[in-house]
Each structure stands twice: as C-alpha cells, then as structure tokens.
Amino acid sequence: DGGITQSPKYLFRKEGQNVTLSCEQNLNHDAMYWYRQDPGQGLRLIYYSQIVNDFQKGDIAEGYSVSREKKESFPLTVTSAQKNPTAFYLCASTAGDITEAFFGQGTRLTVV
Amino acid sequence: AQSVAQPEDQVNVAEGNPLTVKCTYSVSGNPYLFWYVQYPNRGLQFLLKYITGDNLVKGSYGFEAEFNKSQTSFHLKKPSALVSDSALYFCAVRRYGGSQGNLIFGKGTKLSVKP
C-alpha cells in the first residue's frame, strides 16, 4: 500500500543533542513537507521541498535542517540550536497544487 | 496576510444531532480549501476539499462543507453526529506565492460527541 512512513514514533532528546526524524514515501509525490504541531497552535511549516536536491525554509525553520537526496526521503534534523523542540512532528507529501496532502503518523519528540 | 481562522476551540454535540465546525479564511486569489481530521497521536486524514464548482462539497464519513465566497467561510457539517466523530478538525487553505500544495492551517477545533 502507498503511504508515508515516519520513524520513530517516539523520540527522546537530551539537551545539546541533534536528532534526526525519518520520513519516507512511496507515493511518487514530488513535494514533501515538515510541520510542527503544538497544542492549541495548529500546524506550522518548518521546511518543504518541491524536487530532489532542493528545499525551502518554512515559517519556523530556525534550529532545524533537512535534506532531499532522494525523491522518497525527506529527513528532518532537530539541532541543538532549537531551544524548545518538544512537539509532535508531521511529515506530508502532495502530488500537485490542488491535490490533498497525505500525512505520516507523526513523531513525538521529547526533551529529557 | 493569508490566514485561516477556526473561531471555536471546542464544539460539543449530542450523538444524532447535526454538527458544524466553523472556518473562515483570508487569501488572495481563488481559495483552495481543505478539511482534515486528526485522532489522538495520529497523523491528519483528508476529509474533503473545495477547488471550484459546486459550493457544497461532500467528503468522507458523511461530512460535507459549504463554501461561501461572500462570507469567506468553509464550514464543515454533518447531519447526524456519531461518538466516533470525536476528534480534532483542521481547516486549511493553499498558500499563494509558495510551493505547490503548501498549506496554511487553522489552529484546530476539538469536536466532542456525547452519547
């Protein structure tokens, strides 16, 4: 079945540590996105990528980095520069401008 | 500025009664509008979208939404609520000037359906 797979489901980060969240899709979608979800704030865009080897900052990119070396994969690294990383992270992809986005099941990141 | 507003943090409905979850938007150009549902600790699931055409859009699980251009609204409706409809609902609009499919989300409305 086609879809988006995020891993791990739960992730714990120590202070000053970088962690990487995985996002893989087999939908053959060109565009991929990372959103951050905090209670009562909806979803905020971190980074997005329209094609391989290209990506753009979203609304809250500071403290995050991404890569897009393959069409299927769009990993997100939460760096030590992100001072408040505890949140639910969602990866999504779209096939085109007016098509709906498909979402992964999310990764819950907690700072310990 | 482009934005989406969901004016109610929570909506409470009795099972069997009709439900409405409100959404208003502000975008330049013609809006592409979406509704998604989220169950606890899960990703978002697509319910329906408005691109063009009929103002009443039908979607998954018996949900529908009415596009009203003059009021810049896109309210989600269902004639008869189920307990299993209890979830977090997000309205979204495509962002103009950005990448394809780049969406702006509202803050979400928690729907609680009581038996």
Image (tube, coloured by chain):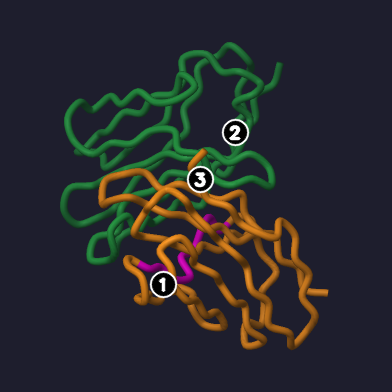
Chain colours: A orange, B green
- What count of labels does the image hold? 3
Q: Position of residue A110 (x, y in %)?
A: 76, 68
Check disc 1 and give the amino acid type. Gly
Lateral position of residue A11 relative to residue B71, left or right: right
Percent x, y of residue A108: 70, 60
Q: Residues within 10 Å of mark 1 (few under 14, many from 20)?
A: some
Seen from the viewer's position, the closer of residues B9 and B62 is B62
In the rendered structure, which segment of residues is drawn in magenta? Answer: A41-49
Q: Judge depth for marks 2 and 1 and give the one in front.
A: 1
Chain letter of mark 2 equals: B
Do dots 3 and 1 share one subunit?
Answer: yes
Residue occupying the point 63% across, 39% down: B39
Residue neighbourhood size for the residue with mark 2, other residues' Cα within 10 Å, grouped as few (<14), some (14–19), many (≥20): many
Q: Is residue B114 above or below residue A31?
A: above
Residue bearing the label numbered 3: A3
- Closer to viewer: mark 3 or mark 1: 3
Q: Secondary structure at mark 3?
A: loop
Q: Amino acid at mark 3?
A: Gly
| Numbered badge on residue A58 | 1
Q: Is residue A82 left or right of residue A25?
A: right
Query: Which residue sits at x=38%, y=52%?
Result: A28
Asked if residue A34 lies left or right of residue B34, the reply is: right
Give the percent coordinates (x, y) of residue B71: 25, 39
Q: B25 and B50: which one is in front? A: B50
Q: Residue furthest right?
A: A112
Residue at the image point whose x is 26% and y is 46% from the top: A98
- Indicate which disc residue B111 carries: 2
For the residues labelled 3 and 2, the Cα–Cα distance comes to: 26 Å
